[in-house]
Image: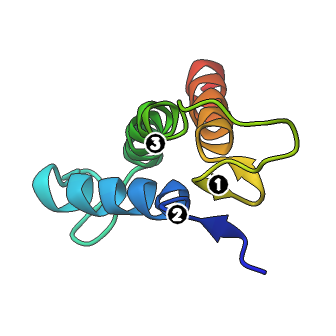
Amino acid sequence: MLIYRGVGLLTLLTPIAALLLILILFPDPAVGRGNTSFSQVLLAFGLGSAINVVLGFVLNRKPRTPGQHASHHFFFLPMQWPAMAVVAVCVVVALLR
């Protein structure tokens, strides 16, 4: 039994890919080469997870019968909900900083 189904693994991989892209394309000169600031991490994880929220709603939009699992899930939840939780956490942490 896998913890993901369909493209649900993107819930984990897209924020990591966004972080790597931000690290490569927009390096922060204040933290040195190969490092990233906390604000860049929040931005990358927030953007990557926001992409997953939209992707999850699009991919899981067909109606399901009661008891039927979503076609694309991560940790047995439709992939948009864990991604939405990550976006919410990033927004809250950014506002509290």
Q: Earlier in the sequence, mark 2 or mark 3?
A: 2
Q: Which circle, 2 or 3, is nearer the viewer? A: 2
Do callouts 1 and 2 mark residues in contact (Cβ within 8 Å)?
yes
> Taking 31 as reference, is 59 above or below it?
above
Outermost residue on the front side: it is 65
Q: Which residue is mark 1?
A: 73
Which residue is identified by label 3?
52
Give the total number of marks visible in the rendering: 3
> What element does badge 2 sit on?
loop
Q: Where's residue 7, x and y in %?
A: 47, 61
Identified by mark 2, the residue type is: Gly
| Residue 28 point in image, percent of width and height | 23, 50
| Residue with the most extreme left position | 25
Q: Which percent across, then down, holds residue 94?
A: 55, 27
Which residue is rendered at x = 79% and y = 47% of the image?
68
**Counting other residues with Cα less than 10 Å from the Cα at mark 3, is it few (<14), some (14-19), or many (20 or more)?**
many
Of 12 and 78, which appears nearest the observer?
A: 78
